[in-house]
Amino acid sequence: MFDAGEVTLYLPPEIPDDALWSGPPVDASAIGAALGGVRVASLDALGDALAGRRDIATLPAPDAETRSQQSTLLGRPITSAPLAGPDGALADAVIQLRLRHDDAAVAELRLAAEITALAHHAGMRATMPGIRESAVRAAMEAPLTELGCATAYGSIVTVHGEILHNESHHNLLEADDLLLADVGAETPGGWAGDVTRTWPVSGTYSSAQADVYDVVLTAQRHAIAAVRPGARYRDIHMVALRSLAAGLRDLGVLLGDPVERAHDGTAALLFPHGVGHLLGLDVHDMEDLGDRAGYAPGRDRSAEPGLKYLRLDRDLAAGMVVTIEPGIYFVPALIDDPDVRRRTAGRVDWARLDVYRRIRGIRIEDDVLVSATGADVLTAAIPKERNKIETVLARP
Ligand code: GLY
Ligand code: MN
Ligand code: MN
């Protein structure tokens, strides 16, 4: 609790059998000292400390049980977002603290990026036809575990990259599959990496795979080139969307003016999510506060197909870390929907699209620090050019 400049950390009291199941009790005074000399007290004393106080602000805990304890302690309902009154003001203060990272936080995010790189190299080297996705996942998570890290989110390692948050890992890898691996380390200090690479199980991109891969890579480069202080993140999303639309038009999949295809919802059929999000202590940083952190005051999430899943719409500032993660996905539920086909008549060459649908999904994702003048790609050491990935895949 922060109260009139004093900080007190309330820790759950030890119960007798804790020593049996969890080892020796924690040294509360050592924790207080490690946090810079804060006072430490038993959680049992928090009720008394709060008695009669109506001026205390809090943030709702993510889990319902703790929220219910918060309600009991404060004598008022504590619900999740949207937050109002003192809770809203506290949320805004925390957001302002966490939106831009100081040197110590950036060092942690660089460490997360470095360890995430080890995972992706390990995954590329473990890939071969006939093994399961789970074997590649295990190879990727091994270096993280060895270095004392956790995964920053449920690893996505799949030959069905069109299922955006596919967390099953049972499929066998076939030689003509692309493997999409979205895996990131969480450092022991709690900071997240979030990287996606997509590579061919055979070791070499087929010509159709290369066509679509290069469209995604070009869009990702265009989007990263647009990152700088003052740039509006939604505009960076549109840079990626327009670039993807132009590439898909060049491949003959989209028809007509690519700028129109980016703006009329057609390109969003193949790129249905936003170009990225804030990254920090959480992978979708501060999203437990709803759009309050991701969207600047006065900006609301659009309902348009190309924008409704955009998690971030702020003007970038030096010290922010964002992901840039465009992709192309051939999602049967979207591209085979008769209504969708009617609505987009004349804007998609469906026969041409069929040439590429076996690709299923390609995403390329990097973690990008907004520097004083532009972008500093924290995850630049992880290969993403086709020839560089093929070189890693070819290693004995
Ligand atoms: N790993 C989840 C995401 O990229 O947003
Ligand atoms: Mn991400
Ligand atoms: Mn990711």
Image (cartoon, grey):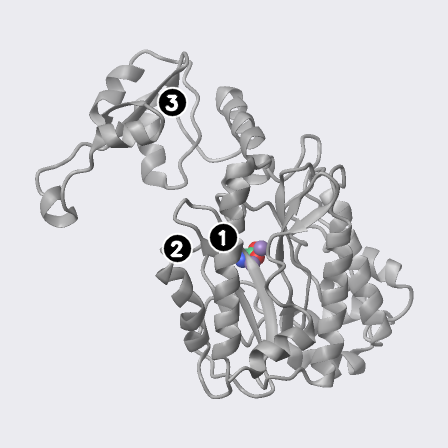
Question: Which residue in the protein does label 2 denote?
Answer: 149
Q: Which of marks 2 and 1 is nearer the N terminus?
A: 1
User: Which quadrant is home to the N terminus?
Assistant: top left
User: Disc 1 versus disc 3: distance between alpha carbons?
Assistant: 39 Å
Residue at the far right: name it. 257
User: Disc 2 versus disc 1: distance between alpha carbons?
Assistant: 9 Å
Q: Earlier in the sequence, mark 3 or mark 2?
A: 3
Tell me, yes or no, whether the two marked residues, 3 and 2, touch with CB atoms within 8 Å: no
Q: Which amino acid does label 1 sit on?
A: Ala
Question: Which residue in the protein does label 1 denote?
Answer: 112
Q: Can residue 162 be seen in this view?
A: no
Are there few (<14), some (14-19), or many (20+) residues within 10 Å of tag 1? many
Q: Which residue is drawn at 56% across and 74% down?
A: 160
Image spot of residue 26 (x, y percent): 20, 37
Are there few (<14), some (14-19), or many (20+) residues within 10 Å of tag 3? few
Q: In which quarter of the image is residue 174?
A: bottom right
Residue 257 lies, with reference to residue 212, above or below; the image says above
Q: Is residue 339 left or right of residue 249?
A: left
Q: In this view, does 50 lie to the left or right of 182?
A: left
* Element under disc 3: loop
State yes or no: Cβ of the residue under disc 2 lies below 8 Å from any atom of ligand 1. Answer: no
Question: Which residue in the protein does label 3 denote?
Answer: 76
Are there few (<14), some (14-19), or many (20+) residues within 10 Å of tag 2? many
